[in-house]
Image (tube, helix red, strand yellow):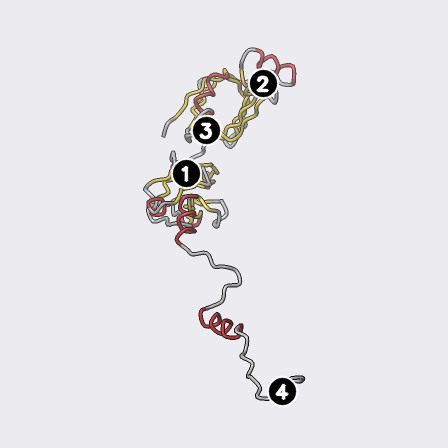
Amino acid sequence: MNTITIEGQLRTGFGKGATRQLRSQELVPGVIYGGAQEINFFAPAAAFKPLIYTPKFQLADVKIDGKSFRCILKDLQFDKVSDALIHVDLMELVEDKKMIASIPVHITGSAKGVKDGGKLHVKMKALKVKTYPKYLKEQIDVNVDNLELNGNIRVEDVKEDNFEILNSPRIPIASVTLTRELKQEEAAATPAATPGAATPAAGAATSTAAVPAKTEKSDKPEKGKK
């Protein structure tokens, strides 16, 4: 798994003034928790970019005062106006302690429903898992070969050894839906029923009933005529 190295320093000053001073020098304060003790540090903003601006799941090796801390990214804060990074939360990985991480979903294969004219929709980009650090990996592969039109692959369909998946089991991860063109083709292939149209038998009966009955000619002369 890819690991980003970050060179940091312990924070000695705290409070709003000290934090503003760090940020004015393009330094970002951060905290490492989850290990034996909580560590407050700072590092150049540029050092965090490879860890933050990527869809990949990566580890961070944070070096502070000769010590190395193996971590994963847990939370970020950005300035509401400038959108600059202003704080980072990292979790230290402890080998015999389970932790929670979001692992990206990687779709593999070619969905049967797409071959039949549908469109694939990926609805979840990551799955939240609980596991030991040694089992962490860059992505969770989800194969869609057998996914048919109007079908779904749900969280409960993903089987991963050593991972406890924490997302709701019925949430769809990927689905195949009809495209507009396919819907139009299906509509054209199905004759539209005319509202109120009668069946042939009923129509025949109606037609017969609609013909006025013949009036029999009377042999009696009309009044006033001889």
Q: What is the secondary structure assignment of the residue under circle 3?
A: strand
The amino acid marked with disc number 4 is Lys
> What amino acid does circle 3 point to?
Cys
Q: Position of residue 138 (x, y in %)?
A: 38, 33
Q: Tell me which label, 2 or 4, sits earlier in the chain.
A: 2
For label 4, the SS is loop
From the viewer's perspective, is residue 48 above or below residue 197? above
Q: Residue furthest bottom?
A: 220
Q: What is the spatial separation of the Cα atoms under label 2 and label 1, in whole angstroms?
A: 31 Å
First-in-chain label (2 vs 3): 3
Residue contact between numbered discs 2 and 1, judged by CB atoms under 8 Å: no
Q: Position of residue 25 (x, y in %)?
A: 55, 11
At 58% from the left edge and 16% from the top edge, which residue is drawn?
12
Disc marking residue 82: 2
Q: Residues within 10 Å of mark 4 (few under 14, many from 20)?
A: few
Q: Is the C-beta separation of discs 4 and 3 under 8 Å?
A: no
Mark before the other along the chain sequence, 3 or 1: 3
- Compute the Cα span from label 2 to label 4: 113 Å
Q: Quadrant of residue 213?
A: bottom right
Read off the residue under disc 3: 71
Q: Is residue 197 above or below residue 31?
A: below
| Marks 1/4: CA–CA distance | 104 Å
> Percent x, y for residue 28?
54, 18
Circle 1 Cα neighbour tier, 10 Å, few/some/many (<14 / 14–19 / ≥20):
some
Q: Nearer the viewer, residue 27 or 184?
A: 184
Q: Which mark is residue 226?
A: 4
Q: Which residue is mark 1?
A: 105
